[in-house]
Amino acid sequence: MSFCDPQAEAKGAAVNAAKAANEAAERARESKAGATGAQGSAVAASSASAEAKGGAAAASSASTEAKDAAAAARGASAEAKDVAAAAEKLLARIRAAVGRAMPRRPIGVQRLANGRVSIPVGSVNPAHLKIVEVSFSPDPLRSHQPVTASFRVKDTRGFVVRDALVYVFGLPEGNFLPAEEKRTNPEGLVQIVLRPTSKVVLKDGAHVVLFVRRATRPTSCLRASRHVALFDCASPLPTARPGSSGRLSRSRNGQRGAGRRSADDPCVARPY
């Protein structure tokens, strides 16, 4: 029969209790360390979440800025298209204006020996005909003998016009017999014989009115134009008396015979 020592048993129990307490403390420390690590992980996760939210906000802002930039680019593109269209229209207007300002070279141009440029009457369009020179022989009119009237026809570009039809008659009606309609020569000149009647008053200071019509073709009204010319009259020259020198007095303008007048003379080529 064996006997146990109570002190030894108590001592063993105390040792075992101490070991159990140490193990419990160790486990408590490990639990604390685990809790600390979990807390750090939670903080890190929260920080990562905040950064993710910040990145999302930045991405959203960048997207908005990109949309604004795209809208601005579309607006600039539309403005550029409008500017290009306006520039194209302006260029077209400039080209049209230059085309109108620069006369087209007409067909059938002939350079004459005197330097003038002659064109056929069919090449006058889009210009217009005009009379630039008028002359009469004799001038002034002192009798009822036939008179030769000369006219030079040009267009508004300055070319002399050949084959233009010119017709002249006196006003009031009956001062001259009907004259023949004639065409201009390559110099743009035409001579028409006028036959005054007894209705023409021959005295100093008087004049007769000639209505001049020129056209591109017979019975043309679209391209026809008209001028009024004044032809001076004067009293008949006195006949030489026996024993005199036989000289005749001069006319009012100090000249005898044919006189040439320019269209600059306001009494010669007035537009009708």
Image (spheres, rainbow, N blue to C red):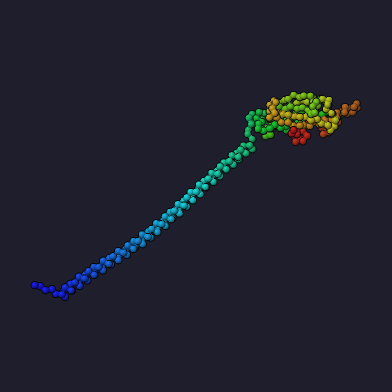
Quadrant, the N terminus: bottom left
Locate residue 270, reporting x and y percent.
75, 34
Which picture quadrant has residue 139?
top right
Task: Return the residue nearer the eye: 160 or 182.
Answer: 182
In the current view of this chain or complex, which residue is farthest to the front?
Answer: 1
| Residue 125 place in picture, x, y as percent | 65, 31
Can see residue 140?
no
Tell me residue 198's x, y (percent).
Answer: 83, 25
Residue at 70% over, 31% down: 129
Q: Quadrant of residue 211?
A: top right
Q: Residue at x 44, y 53 (%)?
A: 60
Residue 220 lies, with reference to residue 49, above or below; the image says: above
Q: Is residue 233 left or right of residue 70?
A: right
Closer to us: 189 or 48? 48
Q: Which residue is rendered at x = 38% and y = 58% of the image? A: 49
User: Residue 61 falls in which quadrant of the image?
Assistant: bottom left
Residue 67, placed above or below residue 209: below
Q: Residue 86: give x, y in percent of width and height.
A: 57, 43
Of 263 and 14, nearer the camera is: 14
| Left or right: where 200 falls relative to 219 | right
